[in-house]
Amino acid sequence: MGNDFKKRFMSNRMAVAGSVIVIFLFAVSLLAPWLTPHDPNAIDLKNVLASPSEGHPFGTDPLGRDVLSRMIWGAGISLKVGFVATGISILIGTILGALAGYYGRWVDALIMRFVDIMLCFPTFFLILAVIAILEPSIWNIMIVIGLTGWMGVTRLVRADFTSLKERDFVQAARAIGAGDLRIIFLHILPNAMASVLVTATLGVAGAILTESALSFLGIGVQPPTPSWGNILTAGKDNIDIAWWLSFYPGLAILITVLGYNLLGEGIRDALDPRLRR
Amino acid sequence: MLRYIAKRLLFMIPLLFGITVVCFTVMHLAPGSPTDLQTQMNPRASVEMKERLRSMYDLDKPLPVQYIRWLGKLAHLDLGISFSTDRRPVADKILERLPITILLNVLSMLLIFVVAIPLGVLSAVRQDSLFDRVTAVIVFIGFAVPTFWLALLLMILFGVHLGWLPISGIRSLNAEYLPPGMAFWDLIRHLILPVLLAAFGGLAGLSRYMRANMLEVIRQDFILTARAKGLSERVVIYRHALRNALLPVITILGLSVPGLIGGSVIFETIFAIPGMGQLFYMAVMARDYPVVMGILFIGAVLTLFGNLIADVFYALADPRIRVS
């Protein structure tokens, strides 16, 4: 891998564009306190729903808060949600998939039937139902998005494990007396990580989309904490007078999701050019 | 064929059972008692009344007993009574709203089918052409667009600025007084944006999938044979290749059911469509647990049936499935 991977990745313009977007978003979230022209929560009732101008490039919201500043803070929120939620689903999915693929038989049957059952639920319904019970908060939505998104990872890791466990290096490890846990985590898992990495990158994009939809519906990140989704809620309420409230935050979501998708596909192509569609 | 359907139905039983267990577990994630909501706000609620409420919802019994009782009610399609002030049976509230949600989803599915398949086929047939590349870019952006944002933009454009389409509800205020033809047209006008947007997410996915299938089929031996026989390119592509590439699409349509149903929450809320999705949203906001659980259950069952129908159609279309 190593050098080959780097060369293939760097020669893929789309992949590089994706990384630039992702790095940019990280920079924006880290530097938010220094980048924002205004305090994101500063209410200015003399200046409500002001259209874009020099002082407020993206206009102001119904409370007179600067939309650009709120969007800059929102970048960090969406990254946090994306990464924590995806981390949770990857963790659960990898462990369950590894167990199912490695042990096979009833362990496999049990885990995969559970996956089938979970896949029957429209994910958005499941998330909303749990949120209705647990109260919406940024932590709860991270956890819930994570807990409802592991099924695909499980299937993927299981498929990798079922084929990898038959390979010679696993037989060799077993021959020198390595235990199950050692074989699973030290020998097979590193070989399955490539596809997990790709899924994780695409998963961050999905989690950010879900978070914004939830916040848009008022069941996600709660105001006054700014999130791209909850700025859009104000956009919907003022749809006939303030287009900027709807336009810019959505564009930010689109670019972010596009960035992670490009990065994920880029990693996939660079890891294994044969997988290229 | 009947044996195949019977077998699929049999396979559904453990899944259905699992669905009820998950629903029941979610319901009992709630800290405290679900009836707290009704008594908390009411200073006159006595201890006896709380107890009466608890026993009304069977909350005073051990969990396994509660589960069995709930399952028993479920078997009679009794989903409980809504917590909201109308106190109506949950099943009635859902059933009266189900047709509009199903209508929306069927229409979006048809739209996905009608647009995505030709798009995928053309991209595959003209692989790497300008058309193929442009659709690839559009599809890639399509994957990343938050559809609720697109909904807002289209509402601003067609509803607010151009004033061509209504942006809320499924009928105009004066719909009752319109002649039947106009009333129907009124309904169509209200459905255009929601159906278009609900279909949007699926469009990108299915057209890519169709393209990949088609590319795979075109490279197979029987296509070479068809060409070698001297058949025209049209016949080769549309009669021989397309049929085989279409088969797996049936499964994908079945698999897209949960996404469409889940999305109905967003579209019905944005466009104020009185369907199951909007009811779900309102129930979540009001913490009307019986309605939330009822819809969660119905949503899963609809998905299960969507998959069953897809499987049956696949078996009808491809005899190899029935035999094995």
Image (cartoon, coloured by chain):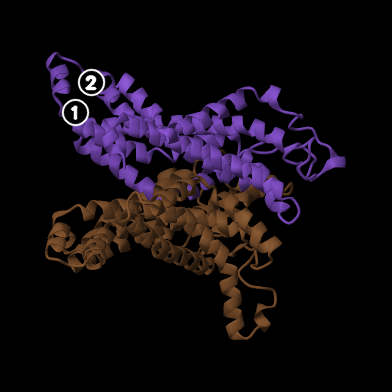
Chain colours: A purple, B brown
Callout 1: few (<14), some (14-19), or many (20+) C-alpha neighbours within 10 Å? some
Residue named by callout 2: A183
Residue A200's disc number: none
Q: Amino acid at mark 2?
A: Ile
Identify the residue shown where x is 39% and y is 63%: B113
Asked whether, in this view, residue A156 is left or right of residue B6, the answer is: right
Q: Amino acid at mark 1?
A: Lys
Residue named by callout 1: A165
Q: Is residue A210 above or below residue B160?
A: above
Q: Residue furthest bottom?
A: B179
Identify the residue shown where x is 40% and y is 27%: A10
Q: Quadrant of the C terminus of chain B?
A: bottom left
Q: Residue furthest right?
A: A46
> In this view of the protein, can residue A92 be seen by the observer?
no
- The span from disc 2 to disc 1 (Cα, nearest Å) is 9 Å
Disc 1 element:
loop
Residues under numbered marks 2 and 1 in contact, where contact means CB atoms less than 8 Å apart: yes
Residue A13 percent location from the top left of the image: 43, 33
Camera-side residue: B35 or B27?
A: B27
Identify the residue shown where x is 24% and y is 31%: A161
Asked whether, in this view, residue A84 is left or right of residue B254, the answer is: right
Residue A93 percent location from the top left of the image: 36, 34
Is label 2 on the same chain as label 1?
yes
Q: Quadrant of the N terminus of chain B?
A: bottom left
Residue B310, by quadrant, is bottom left
User: Mark 2 vs mark 1: which is more N-terminal?
Assistant: 1
Residue A44 percent location from the top left of the image: 84, 37
